[in-house]
């Protein structure tokens, strides 16, 4: 929670109004052209209800660490998560933060021309303005010193992060930050988990990046572990 607040405290966009929406474990920090708290609360509640009802029917969806097929008549968000997980080679819940951000963001775009949604370090961005996404990598000396420039031509997109040293999300690796960019935030989230799982030391970085860049739909990825960093694809870094 402390890491999340530190990251959110650095999020600044003078053209946007920021607000928080929390429903059970879902905790979103949102930037929009106006306060859409009540509308967002209703949207988030609806998607959570869909997922909770689906998990009641299909508990494996919650617990599986490998890809699984969705049941017939699964809600669209669950189907989307299963598809992203299959491409990344992980369980469907590895895509949940990115999927919620994406589905909520797509609905909010009807009410705001610019959207930023942060969900546990995973971002969905939409609109027509260039953005800088700061990199928080825990105790790494590179943490807070770099940002990824997101060109307006690439929006909407997802910028998702997994870490084996920051936060409570499950990771089998030791990366301080494993970041994936994709037009699809669900895919970016699932692939960030897959990337983080592969990196247990600096020697793993190059191979892990190559494997994730081989996933259709991934446009760029980055790994930080201690003082070491690797980048592949369309990732433009700037110093902050």
Image (cartoon, helix red, strand yellow):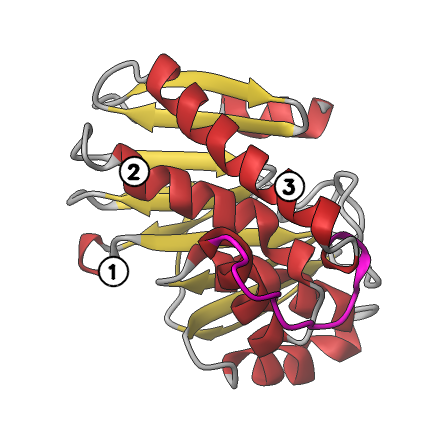
Q: Alpha carbon of mark 3 to alpha carbon of mark 2: how far?
A: 21 Å
Count neighbours of disc 1 (C-alpha within 10 A) and say few if under 14, some if 14 to 19, many if 20 or more. Answer: some
Residue carrying label 3 = 53
Q: Alpha carbon of mark 3 to alpha carbon of mark 1: how far?
A: 34 Å
Residue carrying label 1 = 154
Count neighbours of disc 3 (C-alpha within 10 A) and say few if under 14, some if 14 to 19, many if 20 or more. Answer: some
Residue carrying label 2 = 107
Q: Is residue 178 above or below residue 215?
A: above
Residue range of the region highlighted in magenta in the rendering: 62-75
Mark before the other along the chain sequence, 2 or 1:
2
Mark before the other along the chain sequence, 3 or 2:
3
Coordinates of residue 7 in the picture (x, y in percent):
57, 30
Coordinates of residue 91 in the picture (x, y in percent):
71, 64
Circle 2/circle 1 CB separation < 8 Å: no
Mark before the other along the chain sequence, 3 or 1:
3
Q: Nearer the viewer, mark 2 or mark 1?
A: 2
Magenta highlight on residue 70 = yes
Asked which quadrant contains residue 219, the reply is bottom left
- The answer to whether residue 136 is seen in the rendering is yes
Q: Secondary structure at mark 3?
A: helix
Nearer the observer, 94 or 202: 94
Indicate the quadrant containing the N terminus: top left, top right, bottom left or bottom right.
top right
Q: Secondary structure at mark 2?
A: helix
């Amino acid at each position: 929670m402390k890491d999340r607040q530190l990251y959110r405290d650095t999020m600044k966009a003078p053209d946007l109004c920021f607000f928080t929406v929390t429903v059970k474990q879902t905790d979103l920090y949102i930037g929009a052209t106006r306060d859409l708290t009540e509308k967002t609360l209703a949207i988030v509640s609806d998607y959570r209800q869909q997922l909770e009802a689906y998990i009641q029917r299909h508990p494996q969806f919650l617990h599986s660490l490998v890809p699984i097929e969705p049941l017939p008549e699964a809600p669209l968000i669950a189907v989307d998560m299963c598809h992203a997980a299959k491409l990344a080679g992980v369980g469907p819940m590895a895509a949940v933060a990115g999927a919620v951000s994406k589905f909520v963001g797509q609905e909010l775009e009807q009410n705001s021309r610019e959207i930023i949604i942060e969900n546990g370090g995973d971002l969905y961005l939409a609109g027509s303005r260039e953005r800088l996404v700061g990199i928080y990598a825990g105790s790494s000396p590179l943490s807070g010193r770099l940002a990824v420039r997101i060109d307006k031509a690439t929006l909407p997109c997802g910028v998702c992060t997994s870490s084996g040293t920051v936060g409570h999300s499950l990771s089998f690796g030791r990366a301080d930050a494993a970041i994936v960019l994709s037009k699809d935030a669900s895919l970016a989230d699932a692939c960030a988990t897959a990337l983080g799982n592969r990196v247990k030391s600096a020697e793993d970085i190059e191979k892990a990046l190559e494997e994730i860049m081989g996933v259709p739909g991934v446009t760029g990825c980055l790994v930080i572990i201690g003082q070491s960093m690797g980048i592949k694809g369309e990732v433009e870094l700037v110093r902050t």
